[in-house]
Amino acid sequence: MSIRRLSVLDLIPVRDGQSTGQALAAGIALAQAAEAAGFHRYWVAEHHNMPAVASTNPPVIIAMLAGATQQLRIGSGGIMLPNHAPLVVAEQFALLEAAYPGRIDLGIGRAPGSDPVTNWALRHGGPQTGDADRFPEHVDNLIAMMEPAGVGLNLQGRSYALRATPNALGRPTPWLLGSSDYSARLAAEKGLPYVFAHHFSGDSTADVLDLYRSAFRPSDVSPAPQTFLTVNVVVAPTQEEADRLARPYVLAMVALRTGGELKPQVSVEEAAAVRLPEAHEALGAQLSERWVVGTPEKAAAQLEELADHFGVDEVMVHPVAGALAGDPVDRNPAREATLALLASQVLAPVAV
């Protein structure tokens, strides 16, 4: 199956010597580069209290990105529903859809997206709002609240009208995200589009997608199964350069998995000088074995092979190329080049 659409997942990385504002500026520039190259959608993640990640509040970032682009679909990959009241999320995304009609995706996840202390702070010390038992209920409530007509809330014998925004003309497209078969089953049951996190949990991708497709029940949201593939990607003119650009993110992932110090991402030059213990180097190789790292021709061929294997015609790439020490602080040229080089091989030329 050939790829018809390329999309982008962004965590808004923060590198050493870069402020949050500069990282956000680099993210906006990357979204504009994605749109110019013909990418279809651009999603931002939700992570908290991480020195190398500025994507803490997707609705705020989505508003910034949508305002800086013209046609690109902008969304969350995803909103971690355990951290939020469904009505708050419904209000945020109903407003985004009103401001940028037909361009907003609401990806919903079940993971907390942070460490236990930060999770406690997010919920004022209270219980999760989206635990395994109540997550389906909260998904239903969130989607219903975003309906233009709103919902009726029965309270103390009276019915109250509840709308996420006063006069909506449409609603964002909801997606369920997951890294196990739980969300796949739920998405199939509720007739929702679904994305499996192949970029960091790819051992069971085929089985989970088969489960989703076989159990899918058509709905008003989606009459047929909708899914795509997520992949970590670095593309450069040579294999050697691509490997070099991937090294800072490899080091970051090894630190995350081994309890190492989490800090802003180091430069490509600094990463090249780091020598890890043999066991950690092996872990880095294992973690990156599903990544697509190479020349434009090689990367395109690998993505086409993955799309064919998993039966998808859209691939969402997470560009993990690092930055050189001399790069401008408000741009990441290697991430932008990854998108441009990949699009030149996969997508048809875009009319200007």
Image: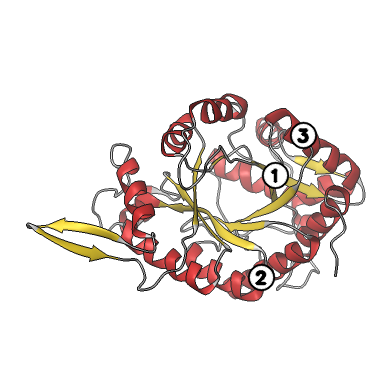
Image coordinates for residue 71, horizontal then vertical, percent: 67, 67
Residue type for callout 2: Ile
Residue type for callout 1: Glu
**Quarter of the figure that contains the C terminus:** bottom right
**Quarter of the figure that contains the N terminus:** top right
Separation of marks 2 and 1 at Cα, in angstroms: 22 Å
Judging depth in this view, the residue of 38 and 264 nearest the camera is 38
Image coordinates for residue 157, horizontal then vertical, percent: 7, 57
Residue type for callout 3: Met
Judging depth in this view, the residue of 65 and 313 nearest the camera is 313
Q: Earlier in the sequence, mark 2 or mark 1?
A: 2
Q: Earlier in the sequence, mark 2 or mark 3?
A: 3
Image coordinates for residue 262, horizontal then vertical, percent: 55, 52
Residue drawn at the location 23% of the way across and 65% of the way down: 161
Separation of marks 2 and 3 at Cα, in angstroms: 31 Å
To which residue does mark 3 refer?
1
Packing grade of label 1 (10 A; few <14, some 14-19, many >=20) is many
Residue 124 against residue 4 in the figure, above or below = below
Q: Is residue 317 left or right of residue 12?
A: right
| Residue 314 circle label | 1
Residue drawn at the location 41% of the way across and 48% of the way down: 112
